[in-house]
Every structure is written in C-alpha cells, then in structure tokens.
Image (cartoon, grey):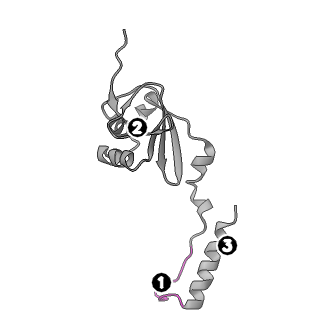
Amino acid sequence: MSESKEIRIDKYLWSVRLFKTRSLASDECRKGRIFINNIQVKPSRTVIKGEILIVKKPPVNYTFRVIEPIENRVSAKLVSRFLEDLTPEEEKLKLDFRNTGGTFYRDKGSGRPTKKERRLIDKLKDDSNFIK
C-alpha cells in the first residue's frame, strides 16, 4: 500500500526551488499566481502526484507536472525527479532579452538629455519594440 503524502503547495514550490523562500511562495498563492489544474489555489492547498501546476511569473506562465510531492528542499540537480517542466517554448522565449529592445548608451558626464534628445530616445525605443 503506497503512502500519499499531503504537502502544502507553498512548501512544495519552495522545496522544488521555484521560489527562494516559502513566504514568497505563500505570497504568490495569495496574489493568485499559482494554479493547480486551472484552479487558483491558496497556500494551504495540498499537492497530489500527477497534478498540473501553472506558475505565473510575469512575463512567463510556467507549466509543471508534479511527479512526486516532497517536503524537504532538494538540490537543483534532483528537482527533475519531483517536477516535470511542460512549459511551451513560446513562453520561454519571452525571457529572451534580445526581443525586449536594445539598450541605449550615453556618454558619461554628458548630463541629462534635452527635450529633443528625449523624444529621439523614446522614438527609438518604440520602434525597436515593434521589430520581431
């Protein structure tokens, strides 16, 4: 007979290293950014083997499958034994910084931009956001 562990979602998210602290995981649950089987959950909700987790970390919505609920934090190498990443590649591409626009460089000591320079910078930023 197999034992089914009842682990809180906030503790599970912390133990598989999705959040740095358990309190951060609890806060994200309270903010409504954690879903289990497309249902928004509270931090006290228990995790069961095989459930689908959706973790919203703007701008990306990560999707995971629970392989095995665990209580203690594990090393990053062992996370794949307890959690399967189902996040589509399109979502992961949102993190690519090259798609967010270029960086703009100003010489040190050149002071604040003038109104004309500011308009030019804003125009360049807007134009670079549409290139994809």
Q: Residue at x 58, y 55 (%)?
A: 96
Question: Which disc is residue 20 wearing?
Answer: none
The reply to whether the magenta stretch includes residue 113 is yes
Q: Earlier in the sequence, mark 2 or mark 3?
A: 2
Q: Residue furthest right?
A: 131
Task: Tell me the residue that label 1 is attached to.
Answer: 108
Q: Residue furthest top?
A: 1
Q: Residue at x 59, y 79 (%)?
A: 122
Tag 1: residue type?
Lys
Task: Tell me the residue that label 3 is attached to.
Answer: 127
In three-dimensional space, the C-alpha distance between marks 3 and 1, rounded to whole angstroms, equals 25 Å
Against 38, residue 61 (above or below) is below
Task: Judge the density around disc 3: few (<14), some (14-19), many (≥20) Cα neighbours within 10 Å.
Answer: few
Q: Nearer the viewer, residue 69 or 32?
A: 32
Task: Judge the density around disc 1: few (<14), some (14-19), many (≥20) Cα neighbours within 10 Å.
Answer: few
Residue 95: in sight, yes or no? yes
- Mark 3 lies on a secondary structure that is helix
Task: Tell me the residue that label 2 is attached to.
Answer: 76
Q: Earlier in the sequence, mark 2 or mark 1?
A: 2
Quadrant of the snapshot with the C terminus: bottom right
Q: Residue furthest front?
A: 39
Q: Residue at x 52, y 87 (%)?
A: 113
Against 1, residue 20 (above or below) is below
User: Is the C-beta separation of discs 3 and 1 under 8 Å?
Assistant: no
